[in-house]
Image (cartoon, grey):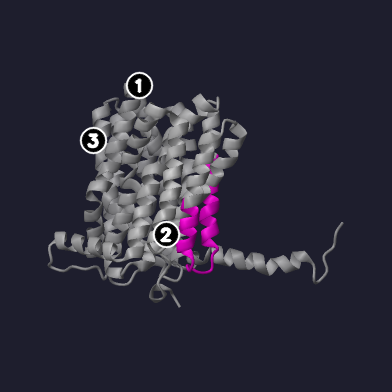
Amino acid sequence: MEHHGPQGSTLGNGPQARRSYSLLVRSFRHRNFRLFFAGQFISLVGTWMQSVAVSWLVYRLTGSSLALGAVGFVTHLPVFVLGLWGGCLADRRDKRWLLVTTQVAAMLQAFALAALTLSGAATVWLVGALAMVLGVVNAVDMPTRQAFVVEMVGKEDLHNAIALNSSMFNSARVLGPALAGLLVAAVGEGVCFLLNAISYLAVIASLLCMRLPPATGCRAEEPMGAHIFEGLRHAWQDRAMRGILASLCLASLFGASFMILLPVMTDAVLGHGAQGLGFLTAAAGVGSVVAALTLAVRPQSRGLGRIRVLAGMGFGATLTAFALSRAFWLSLCLSPVLGFFLILFFAAANTSLQLRSPDALRGRVMALYAITLVGMAPFGSLLAGGLASLIGAPATLAVCGAVCGLGVGVLAATLPAGDIPPSARAS
């Protein structure tokens, strides 16, 4: 049995391991963030359960893939249309109480969906209408939630908190659908909706238990339109911010093709069915969590611009390689790399945007982030589906990967990468 002396590797690695762990969880020093993290994780598991159950319900009611796409489109479209309005509200109101309001509204939407489904009264039109209601709620909730993070942890730990939130989101993305699959098979979609409604109580309770200083949101008498224009003007005049948002548009429009066309690639190209799809999806999720944790252990936010550019170009190159793969084992190896690069790109962009934003404009800037990340996704889905019907799924993925990787590279060459300005770095 090997024995390590005083200079042995066991003891030598101990301090380094403890330092890495302390860097990883340093946002948990903040009581408010601990509360938020716990409540949000429970709620996100429920949200992913509902997302999967809605898909099952719509397909069961219609048997139509077109109906599935339409419901997904109306869920995300309000974020594109109303996102800036939601970001303006975040800058003008108390963010904590605005989040309580959106969570209560989302809870009521889930209860309504559960009641319709359990009573047998659900129709695809009612489900679509409720999906649009949730989209309107998300148009306010997403920018407010993103802008609220800095109020819980401060700028010093912001990149760590964003990375931990990303790991939480992707962990819930693995757990929620798995639970939904079991519950839908055992007791039906209605129970998933009911459990999701109940899960909102956790995040509402966490928000109510926080101890926060008095809100400093802008309550100016200026019209909301003027405030929205102020946010747009700031994002346009900051060349680095403009480059980050443009690259996010590229990644959302062309990167969305991966998840949209993954079932086609798995079945028609790689020759594996639902089980293969599950393995590829889970592998991408593992890569996403690893990326988030990689960012979380970074001691500082400097260099995020370079990381974002390299991750975007890496995602494009890997997506092209995935499109060319005809072996399931190779695709399974590439999936976690895709998940890793994509989440590294989005998390680095999120942090850079937040740290470049003045406090008074952060809600509006994060609304632009939500619009480019979520609001563009329906258009990316339509683009991927339409192009795949013309040239096939593999060629579509190859084109999207090339456009994404080259586009991010060209933007980085013509605009600043978006590293954090010295004035925004915590001391």
- Residue 288 in percent (x, y) is at 51, 49
* Residue that mark 3 sits on: 129
Circle on res. 63: 1
- Image quadrant where residue 350 sits: bottom left
- Residue 33 in percent (x, y) is at 43, 63
- Mark in the foreground, 1 or 3: 1
Alpha carbon of mark 2 to alpha carbon of mark 3: how far? 44 Å
Q: Residues within 10 Å of mark 2 (few under 14, many from 20)?
A: few
- Image quadrant where residue 415 sits: bottom left
Residue at disc 3, secondary structure: helix
Alpha carbon of mark 1 to alpha carbon of mark 3: how far? 19 Å
State which region is magenta: 283-312
Residue type (three-letter) at the residue carrying disc 2: Ala
Determine contact: label 2, label 3, CB under 8 Å: no
Mark 1 or 3 closer to N-term? 1
State the quadrant of the N terminus: bottom right
- In the depicted structure, whether residue 117 falls above or below residue 293: above
User: What number of labels is visible?
Assistant: 3
Residue depicted at 19% across the width and 61% down the height: 229
Determine contact: label 2, label 1, CB under 8 Å: no
Residue depicted at 12% across the width and 62% down the height: 223
